[in-house]
Image: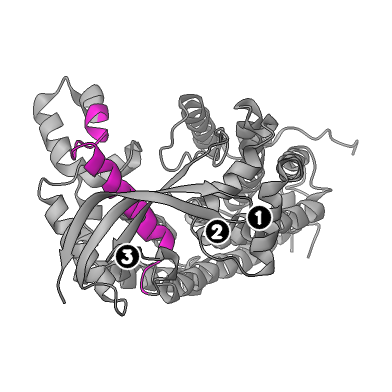
C-alpha cells in the first residue's frame, strides 16, 4: 500500500466521527468568540492571566485588617486560606467604596434591561442582598474567631499604602474603610 | 484477533489507566484542598457572592444553586460528600456506568462555580482538570481516542494562548513588567522582615528588572514552544519536561502551583489512543 499523507486532526475526526467533528467545531467557534470578546464563559476559559500591563508605581495598595491599630498578618492566619480571605476582603472593600452598588448591576441592566421582570429577578439572584454588610460582619467575626487572639474588639478593614525601598515594602499609612465590632 | 479488535482492546486498556489516573488525581486534589481548609464547607458560610460576568455562572446563580450550597453548611457538606462519592465511583467503574462521568462533570461545574463565586476570584488551577473530564463522557473507543487527542491539542492551546495574550497585549515587551508583577504578587510577604533564600531571590529579581524581564521572555518562549505539538508528537517528551518546568517555575517565582491540573501532563505520554487516526485505524496499534 502506498504511504498515506497525514491530514489535519479535524479532517481525521470528520472522517471517523461526524457528530464529534461538529461538536469540536462548535467548541472551537465558542472559544474563538470568547477570546475575541476578552471574557470567560465556562468551559471557554481565558488564559490571559498576568498579560495586562503592570506599570511602575510609587505606591502599592492592599486591603488589610487591623486590630487595636496594628495590622493583622493575613498570610499567617492558620484557619483561613490567605488568598481566599484577601479576595473576599478586596470584594467587600470594592462594594463599600461604591456604597454597595455592585458593578454587575450595570451589566445586568445592559443585558436584560429590555425585560424588566426578568431583570428584577436577575438582580435578586446575581447581587448580594441589602443586609450583606451586617451578614459580612457576622461572618468575618466568626471566621476570625477561629484564630487565637484575633477576633475580640473592633476590627478595622483598612486600605494600606506601601512603598518599595529596594529591600521590602514599608507601610506609609492606612485609611479605615469600615469597622466591625466582634465579641467572643 | 483482527487488527481492528486489537486497536479496540488497546484503547480500552488506555482508558482504564487514564481514568484511574484522572479520577485518582481528583480525589488527591480534594484531600489536599481539605487539608488546606479550602473546601466550600470549610469557609464558614460566606455571604458575599461574585458571579462576575460569566454566563455559566449567571445561569447557575439564577437557579440559586451556588447560593444554596454555600450559605448552608449542611448542604455544602452533603454536596462535597456526594461529589467525592461520584469521583470514587468513577475511579472504580466509570467505563461500566456511562452516566457517571457526565454526573461527575456536572457536579464539578457546580463545585467550580460555587467556590469561585464565594472567594470572589476565578481560580484557573482547576480549569484544565475540569475540561479533561469531558474525555470520559463517551462509551465508544474511537470517540474516546479522538477526544483524548482533542484534549492534547487543548493543553497545547493553553500555553500558546497564554503567550499570545502577553505578546498581543504588549506586556511581554514592557521592561518593568515582571518586576512589577513580582511586587504585586508578593506584597504581603515582602511587607514583613524578610528571611529565606526564596524571598531574597524574589527581591533580587525585583531590583534587577532586566533579569526578571529576561525570565518573562524565557517563559513566553517556553509557552510558544508548545506550538510544535500542533504539528508533531515527536517532541512531546520535551514538552512534558517544559510543562513541569513551567509550573515549578511558576510555583517558585510566583507562588502559584496550579497543581490541580498537573494530571493534564498525561497527554504528553505515548498512549496508543493518541496515535489512532483514520489512516491507522485499520492497522495494528503502535504500543501493545
Give the farthest residue toward the right.
A2
- Asked if the residues shown at circle 1 and circle 2 are in contact, with their CB atoms under 8 angstroms apart, the answer is yes
Please provide percent x and percent y for residue A74.
Answer: 40, 64
Q: Which residue is mark 3?
A: B40
Residue B143 at what x, y percent from top left?
58, 48
- Which sits in the foreground, A49 or B231? A49
Above-or-below relation of A172 to A70: above
Question: Quick one: SS at disc 3?
Answer: helix
Image quadrant where residue B45 sits:
bottom left
Disc 2: host chain = B
Q: Which of the chains bears the disc numbered 1?
A: B
Mark identifier at residue B203: 1
Could you say whether the residue bearing mark 1 is in a helix, strand or loop?
Answer: helix
For the residues labelled 1 and 2, the Cα–Cα distance comes to: 8 Å
Q: Which residues are magenta?
A: A79-107
Of the 4 image quadrants, the one containing the C terminus of chain B is: bottom right
Q: Main secondary structure of the magenta part?
A: helix
Q: In x, y percent, where is residue B40?
A: 32, 65
C-alpha distance separating marks 1 and 3: 35 Å
Near mark 1 (Cα within 10 A), the count class, few <14, some 14-19 or many ≥20, is many
Amino acid at each position: 500500500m502506498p504511504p498515506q499523507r497525514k491530514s489535519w486532526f479535524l479532517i481525521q475526526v470528520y472522517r471517523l466521527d461526524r457528530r464529534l467533528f461538529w461538536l469540536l467545531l462548535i467548541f472551537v467557534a465558542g472559544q474563538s468568540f470568547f477570546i475575541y470578546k476578552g471574557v470567560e464563559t465556562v468551559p471557554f476559559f481565558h488564559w490571559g492571566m498576568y498579560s495586562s500591563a503592570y506599570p511602575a508605581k510609587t505606591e502599592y495598595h492592599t486591603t488589610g485588617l487591623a486590630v487595636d491599630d496594628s495590622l493583622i498578618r493575613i498570610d499567617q492566619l492558620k484557619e483561613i486560606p490567605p488568598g481566599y480571605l484577601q479576595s473576599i476582603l478586596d470584594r467587600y472593600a470594592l462594594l463599600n467604596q461604591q456604597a454597595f452598588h455592585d458593578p454587575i448591576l450595570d451589566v445586568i441592566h445592559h443585558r436584560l434591561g429590555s425585560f424588566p421582570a426578568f431583570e428584577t429577578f436577575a438582580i435578586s439572584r446575581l447581587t448580594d442582598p441589602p443586609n450583606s454588610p451586617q451578614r459580612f460582619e457576622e461572618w468575618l467575626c466568626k471566621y476570625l474567631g477561629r484564630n487565637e487572639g484575633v477576633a475580640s474588639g473592633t476590627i478595622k478593614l483598612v486600605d494600606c499604602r506601601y512603598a518599595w525601598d529596594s529591600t521590602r515594602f514599608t507601610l506609609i499609612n492606612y485609611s479605615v474603610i469600615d469597622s466591625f465590632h466582634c465579641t467572643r | 484477533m483482527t487488527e481492528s479488535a486489537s486497536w479496540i482492546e488497546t484503547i480500552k486498556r488506555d482508558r482504564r489507566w487514564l481514568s484511574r489516573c484522572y479520577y485518582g488525581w481528583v480525589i488527591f486534589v480534594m484531600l489536599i484542598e481539605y487539608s488546606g481548609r479550602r473546601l466550600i464547607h470549610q469557609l464558614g458560610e460566606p455571604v458575599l457572592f461574585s458571579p462576575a460576568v460569566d454566563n455559566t455562572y449567571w445561569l447557575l446563580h439564577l437557579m440559586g444553586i451556588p447560593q444554596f450550597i454555600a450559605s448552608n453548611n449542611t448542604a455544602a457538606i452533603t454536596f462535597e460528600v456526594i461529589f467525592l462519592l461520584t469521583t470514587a465511583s468513577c475511579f472504580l467503574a466509570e467505563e461500566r456506568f456511562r452516566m457517571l462521568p457526565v454526573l461527575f462533570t456536572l457536579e464539578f461545574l457546580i463545585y467550580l462555580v460555587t467556590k469561585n463565586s464565594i472567594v470572589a476570584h476565578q481560580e484557573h488551577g482547576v480549569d484544565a482538570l475540569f475540561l479533561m473530564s469531558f474525555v470520559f463522557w463517551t462509551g465508544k473507543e474511537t470517540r474516546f481516542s479522538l477526544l483524548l487527542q482533542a484534549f492534547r491539542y487543548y493543553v497545547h492551546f493553553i500555553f500558546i494562548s497564554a503567550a499570545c495574550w502577553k505578546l498581543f497585549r504588549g506586556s511581554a515587551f514592557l521592561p518593568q513588567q515582571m518586576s512589577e508583577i513580582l511586587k504585586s504578587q508578593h506584597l504581603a510577604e515582602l511587607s514583613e522582615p524578610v528571611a529565606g533564600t526564596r524571598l531574597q531571590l524574589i527581591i533580587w529579581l525585583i531590583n534587577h528588572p532586566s533579569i526578571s524581564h529576561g525570565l518573562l521572555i524565557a517563559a513566553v518562549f517556553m509557552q510558544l514552544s508548545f506550538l510544535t505539538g500542533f504539528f508533531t508528537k515527536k517532541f512531546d517528551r520535551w514538552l512534558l519536561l517544559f510543562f513541569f518546568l513551567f509550573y515549578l517555575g511558576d510555583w517558585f517565582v510566583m507562588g502559584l502551583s496550579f497543581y490541580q491540573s498537573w494530571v493534564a501532563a498525561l497527554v504528553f505520554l505515548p498512549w496508543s489512543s493518541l496515535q489512532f487516526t483514520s489512516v491507522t485505524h485499520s492497522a495494528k496499534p503502535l504500543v501493545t
